[in-house]
Amino acid sequence: MSEKRPFTRPIASDWWAHPPYRAYTVRELSGVAVAVYGAVLFVGLVSLWRGPDSYGAFLRFLKSPVSILLNLVLLAAVLYHVVTWFQILPKTMPKLIVDGKQVPQARITTLVLRAVGFGAVCLVLLTIGFAR
Amino acid sequence: MSEAAGRAAPEKRSISPIFWLLFGAGGMLAAVFGPALILITDLLAPTGIGLPENFEDYSHALAFAKNPIGKLVVLAVISLFFWHGAERLYLTLKDMKARPLLVLKFGTYGVAAAVTLATFALLLSIGF
């Protein structure tokens, strides 16, 4: 027979706004920025489906300062997502052993970030090259 | 890895792994292609920096959406990005003790599901 002795340590309701949890909150919300970009594309798809006039209005919105500012914020947030995502990666995979030595987690993050960064730069440059 | 006891008494299975899978796929897609996509579609193309004015005009965008591979790209990016954001927003709001959970689920996973279905329908309606 076990007697239930519930004790819940009190915690401030705004715990997520203060260190060390704030970093966690910011990281999670950077994932929401990913969805916001998805929403921009979704609005574009709906306007494309509605026709040239509607799509023209969408393009005019993309050219507006509000959109440029929004997308600069989205870009910064998604870049933060990229870095934190690959910081998590080594924690979610089996130990990587090369030549009998475990590869440090920070090393895996650095190598993957370099590869992904190189790939992204190539993608942008190739797009610019082919669109000429 | 799984214990014999676990096999003997099959428990009620959680559907959470489905959401983790969608969350992980969206997170990886965003981590690999997200910044380049935002830069190309929302910053360089509209401002004409490096890309021609007609890069994403009506006819180009329509041709992309009519192409089967283009359709797959659009569906994957829009829906998986929404599922990724939904998982993170739901768990964060839950940890912030926002309630009721049913409303949170509709506002996150529900929105992602609705957008996925709508994207699928729009792409079909646009045709091939």
Image (cartoon, coloured by chain):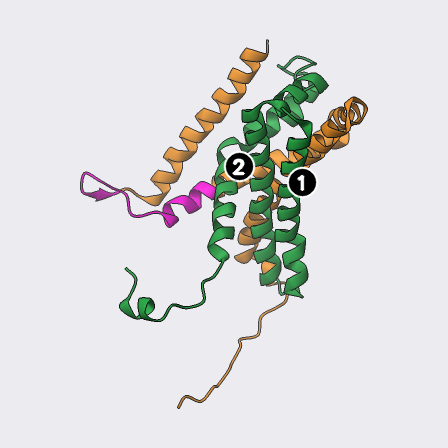
Answer with left or right where residue A132 lies relative to residue A102. right
Q: Which residue is mark 2?
A: B30
Q: Mark 1, chain letter?
A: B
> Is residue B82 or residue B110 the one in the foreground?
B110
- Residue A17 visible in this rendered orientation of the protein: no
The span picked out in magenta is A85-102
Q: Which residue is mark 1?
A: B118
Q: Which amino acid does the dot numbered 1 rest on?
A: Ala
Q: Position of residue A59 (x, y in %)?
A: 75, 24
Q: CA distance from mark 1 to mark 2?
A: 21 Å
Q: Position of residue A14 (x, y in %)?
A: 63, 63
Q: Is residue A70 above or below residue B128?
A: below
> Is residue B3 or residue B43 the one in the foreground?
B3
Chain colored green: B
- Secondary structure of the residue carrying numbered label 2: helix
For image coordinates 61% across by 37% down, the residue present is B78
Display colour for chain A: orange
Within-10-Å neighbours for mark 2: few <14, some 14–19, many 20+ = many
- Residue A2 visible in this rendered orientation of the protein: yes
